[in-house]
Amino acid sequence: MFSYRDLTVPLTGTDRFLPVRATEDRIMTCFLEYPDDYNDYTVVVHDLIHTRADGDADWTLTARSYRKLRLSHARALELLCQAGLRVRARHEESGAGGLRIASRN
């Protein structure tokens, strides 16, 4: 299974904050930034990870940033096929924050 976020359409305002995963002791959120000096093919992703030790009330924040490639849904499917994978399910509608899933046989 292959999943990714189609980030070809820039998100704005609070839509740029995407919940990734949450457990009792770990919360991961990412923030997307589209700076003017970047092109239409990249986005800056800021990961915010809050963790705490078992039973501890205090949370620790870890943050990191990196540039990520912005691929359209059509281009991602094209690349999967070029790699020899057969796409079995194509979700034409995107989910929260542009999340898409393709699975293969």
Image (tube, rainbow, N blue to C red):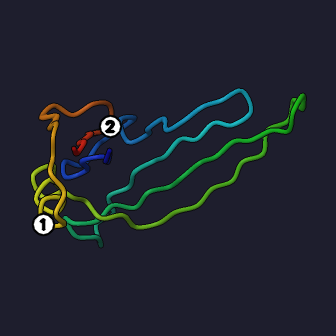
Name above or below for residue 45 compared with residue 50. below
- Where is residue 48 shown, x and y percent of the image? 59, 48
Describe residue 19's horizontal placement relative to residue 62 as left or right: left
- How many numbered circles are shown? 2
| Label whose residue precedes the other's in the sequence (2 or 1) | 1
Q: Secondary structure at mark 2?
A: helix
- Cβ–Cβ below 8 Å for labels 2 and 1? no
Q: Which residue is mark 2?
A: 97
Name above or below for residue 79 compared with residue 56. below
Rendering quarter of residue 89: top left
- Where is residue 53 shown, x and y percent of the image? 85, 38
Please tell me which residue is depicted at 30% across the width and 46% down the height of the picture. 5
Query: In the drawing, what numbered circle is on residue 104?
Result: none
Report crowding for label 1: few under 14, some 14 to 19, many 20 or more residues within 10 A (C-alpha): few
Q: Viewer-proximal residue, 35 or 75?
A: 75
- Where is residue 56 shown, x and y percent of the image? 90, 32
Please tell me which residue is depicted at 87% across the width and 29% down the height of the picture. 57
Q: Which residue is mark 1?
A: 82
The residues tagged by marks 2 and 1 sit, at their Cα atoms, a distance apart of 26 Å
Q: Quadrant of the N terminus?
A: top left
Q: Viewer-proximal residue, 31 or 105?
A: 105
- Where is residue 79 shown, x and y percent of the image? 16, 63
- The type of residue carrying mark 1 is Gln
Report crowding for label 2: few under 14, some 14 to 19, many 20 or more residues within 10 A (C-alpha): some
Q: Quadrant of the C terminus?
A: top left
Q: Secondary structure at mark 1?
A: helix
Q: Viewer-proximal residue, 85 or 71?
A: 85
Please tell me which residue is depicted at 52% across the width and 63% down the height of the picture. 65
